[in-house]
Amino acid sequence: MILNKVLVLSVSAGEGHMRAAAAIKEEIRQRNPAAEVTVLDTFRYASPLIEKVVLGTYMEIIKMSPVIYGYLYRQAEKEKPLSGFAKQEFNRVLNRLAAPKLISFIEQMQPQAVVCTHPFPLGILSHLRTKGKCNMPIIAAITDFTVHPFWLFREVDCYLVAAPQLIKSFIDYGIDAAKVKATGIPIDPRFAVPKDRNLLRQQWGLAAHLPAILIMGGGLGMGPLAEVVKELAAVRLPCQLVVVCGRNETLRSKLLKAAPGLPTKVHVWGYLNNIHDLMAACDLMIGKAGGLTSSEAMASNLPMLITDPIPGQEERNAEFLESVGAARLVRGYHDLVRQVQNYLNHPAVQRAMIEAAGSIGCPRSAAAAADAIEELVFHK
């Protein structure tokens, strides 16, 4: 038996949640090309008002005052996971504004299962379940290396999580461990395809004899990438820098102009849809601790130096990755240079971090997610 009709609900807050949704869709379609897998940007479809007010406010707080966002995130962590006041009130508003249109969509589509790659739609689905209007399995694909109470609802049938170490948190929160599957955060199935590293380095124009350090700021090219490049190039480290600017064309143009005058070789790229190949060709990554990007790095056996994590889930991701030895948190440019030098000069450090990344990397996470959905739908 195979899946032939699945609804995936996400929210375009950043890019990671939608990329996880796309990974699940791609895996299901690979198994059954005729499958109807719909990825819905929930707020954009169900309530443009919510998209404008809630997401607009959310993104503005992160941009203008990440400290305030971090405070709110930590306060929400302290509430009762299944009945916190802030969570209940927030979901009450979502249900009032978004549930009616979503009910119509679900009734018309009649999916075998609904998967959520963002916590906000889960609250709506849980409300619908209590009203008898969402009787198909509800699956939560958590997109960070942590468990936040906003993801937790009694009505969720299965949680897909980043690593086995997180299962204890669910037990502590009163969730049955049988509901939790350590599939890894769903990433593009192409990460699971074996790769010829030497051939990839040739294809990307990378020098075979120099370690390649990948510098990223996510799909939006956020973070002080230009400053990182400047600091590392100035000390003439025995390496080459590979910078991915995402959709930040201003940054890309700036670096392309500056690169020829720098003492270190710098490769500059914009937005890429084949980041799986570039990660496989590199030796170390410097960047943000977004859940999807971090998962992709781990799946590529690519250790990380994490810069400026946003208070909240990025801090939690950084803490987890550092605790297992796959990443190290950088505190300022001087520390960044020191840690890069330490990594390049000590093969034992390289081996330990690569091994740690490989131990939690899940290149087949999308396949594992699809397996879990099939198991739930068909009671395997």
Image (cartoon, rainbow, N blue to C red):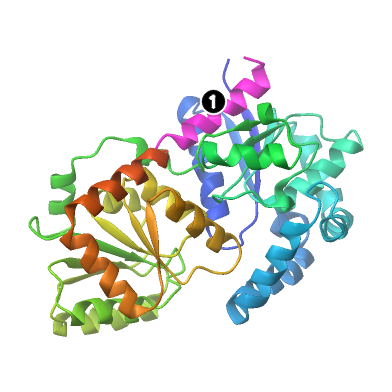
Region of the chain picked out in magenta, as a range: 363-380
Q: Is residue 124 visible?
A: yes
Report the magenta stretch's main SS: helix
Q: Residue at x 42, y 41 (%)?
A: 360
Residue labelled with disc 1: 371
Q: Nearer the viewer, residue 303 or 88?
A: 303
- Residue at figure coordinates x 71%, y 48% from the top left: 151
Q: Position of residue 304 (x, y in %)?
A: 35, 58
Give percent across and percent down for residue 36.
Answer: 60, 33
**At numbered mark 1, what does the secondary structure look like: helix, strand or loop?**
helix
In this view of the protein, can residue 242 be seen by the observer?
no
Left or right, residue 1 beside residue 348 = right
Query: Residue at left 30%, top 52%?
Result: 279
Would you place residue 357 above or below residue 44 in this image?
A: above
Q: Amino acid at mark 1?
A: Asp
Relative to 108, residue 284 above or below: below
Quadrant where the image shows the N terminus: top right
Q: Is residue 373 magenta?
A: yes
Q: Residue at x 86, y 41 (%)?
A: 128
Image quadrant for the C terminus?
Answer: top right
Image position of 151 with respect to 109: above or below = below
Q: Nearer the viewer, residue 254 or 84?
A: 84
For residue 314, which quarter of the picture?
A: bottom right
Q: Is residue 344 magenta?
A: no
Q: Position of residue 352 (x, y in %)?
A: 28, 47
Q: Residue furthest right?
A: 131
The location of residue 232, given as percent across then percent down, is 24, 76
